[in-house]
Amino acid sequence: MAELQRTAPRALTCVSCGTAFSCTGDIDCWCAAESFRLPMPALDSAADCLCPPCLRAKAATVGAGR
């Protein structure tokens, strides 16, 4: 069986607030521990991951709209 290869965390800047943060893009990423799930940005979009506070704020907004 092939061993899963881990990639180095990506250094990102939140598109919402400009805060620097990191993303591993896998099950070990900080966002995997969150209690909510939001769709990932489309691969062909300019959007990228949000920082923890902005992701939580967006989840609260989406949850309130239900």
Image: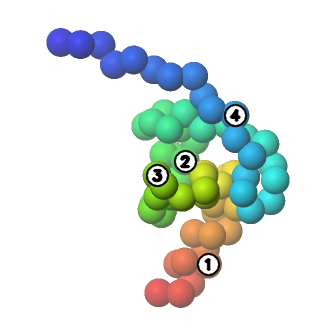
Q: Which mark is residue 61?
A: 1
Name which residue type carries label 1: Thr
Mark 2 lies on residue: 31
Name which residue type carries label 2: Cys
Q: Are marks 3 and 2 in contact (CB under 8 Å)?
A: no
Q: Earlier in the sequence, mark 3 or mark 4?
A: 4
Mark 4 lies on residue: 11
Name which residue type carries label 3: Leu
Q: Earlier in the sequence, mark 2 or mark 4?
A: 4
> Label 3, label 4: how many angstroms apart (C-alpha)?
17 Å
Q: Eyeballing the image, is 17 above or below 21?
A: below
Q: Name the residue at 45% across, 20% down.
A: 6
Residue 38 visible in rendering? yes
Q: Nearer the viewer, mark 2 or mark 4?
A: 4
Q: Are marks 1 and 4 in contact (CB under 8 Å)?
A: no
Q: Earlier in the sequence, mark 2 or mark 1?
A: 2
